[in-house]
Image (spheres, rainbow, N blue to C red):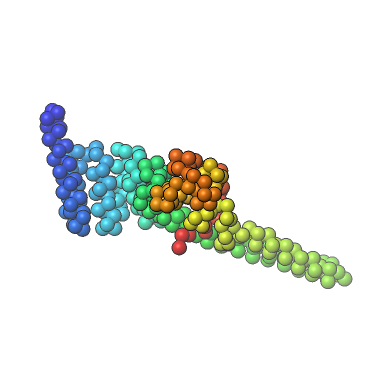
Amino acid sequence: MSPTVAASTAKQAEQLRIDGNSYFKKNRFAAAIDAYTEAITLCPNVPIYWTNRALCHRKRNDWTRVEEDCRRAIQLDHNSVKAHYMLGLALLQREEYTEGAKELEKALDLGRSENPKGYMVEEIWKELARARYLLWEQESTSRSWDLQNLKETCEAALKEKHFLDASLVEGFEDENTQSNLEQLEALRRVFNKASEDDIPTEVPDYLCCKITLDIFRDPVITPSGVTYERAVILDHLRKVGNFDPVSREPLYSSQLVPNLAIKEAVRAFLETHGWAYKTD
């Protein structure tokens, strides 16, 4: 294909994208899909055509096609925030929570790099939190059943042992009964301890932003040593003024540094306390 023809084809494909966008804004998703499909036919290696069409499929709840278009877009552009995000959503629809969460985490990391305060970062985080909570709920239910079954098996074994001991040893019934009760109580304590992480409590204060009181997502630390949620402190600096809201010391966005220690602490806490992902 000559440069002139290639340029003409690209221009035609771009006009089809613009037409598709116009149809999309008017909620004419079928027409938008047709326009993006024509653009893809002309220029199949432009990732935005695929993500735009995927967004139309998402609006129509056609998650199979969302997944197909997003995977193709990612092949063309590994750093496509929208492609990773919508692929994550499509996987969640199939209840593939682990893989869906991985795609959402990728989208979140890319989104934070592009625009930490962008609307998509907040939207992606909410979907990731929902995915992680659903995964925890699924795993917690499974663990609960396993623990309950194991507990009942152990209790039955102790009671059987008590019955056998009582039939073999005469004159020590009271001592044998007391020993059995103590063993059963110790068993209950062990299983209660094993289930503690799955019981919602309160998130430790040091893992929460001092402004929102929510668990950190992207913590940054100021020269004064105070840690805030990045998007929240940036919003404060823009709307209220260039000072630390706690220490009242002068503060500029260039002075904010990622608090990797707190970020890792949050990750470790959420790893074993998935209930903390619940946002409502």
Q: Percent position (x, y) of residue 80?
A: 33, 42
Q: Is residue 169 left or right of residue 276?
A: right
Residue 175: image quadrant is bottom right
Q: Quadrant of the C terminus?
A: bottom left
- The quarter of the picture where the N terminus appears is top left
Q: Residue at x 18, y 52 (%)?
A: 22
Camera-side residue: 120 or 44?
120
Residue 62 or residue 154, whichever sits in front: 62
Task: Tell me the residue at 48%/44% (across/down).
Answer: 251
The percent coordinates of residue 120 (x first, y second) are: 36, 50
Residue at 21%, 55% in the rendered image: 25
Specify whether 67 is left or right of 116: left
Return the residue found at the far right. 171
The reply to whether residue 48 is in sight is yes
Say which residue appears at 37% left-offset and 42% top-offset.
114
- Expressed as whole percent of the image width and height from the top left, the position of residue 27 reads 21, 58
Residue 216 in view, yes or no:
no
Instruction: Report the label total.
Output: 0
Looking at the rendering, which quadrant does residue 193 occupy? Answer: bottom right
User: Is 78 left, or right, of 200 in this rendering?
Assistant: left
Residue 59 sits above or below residue 87 on the image: below
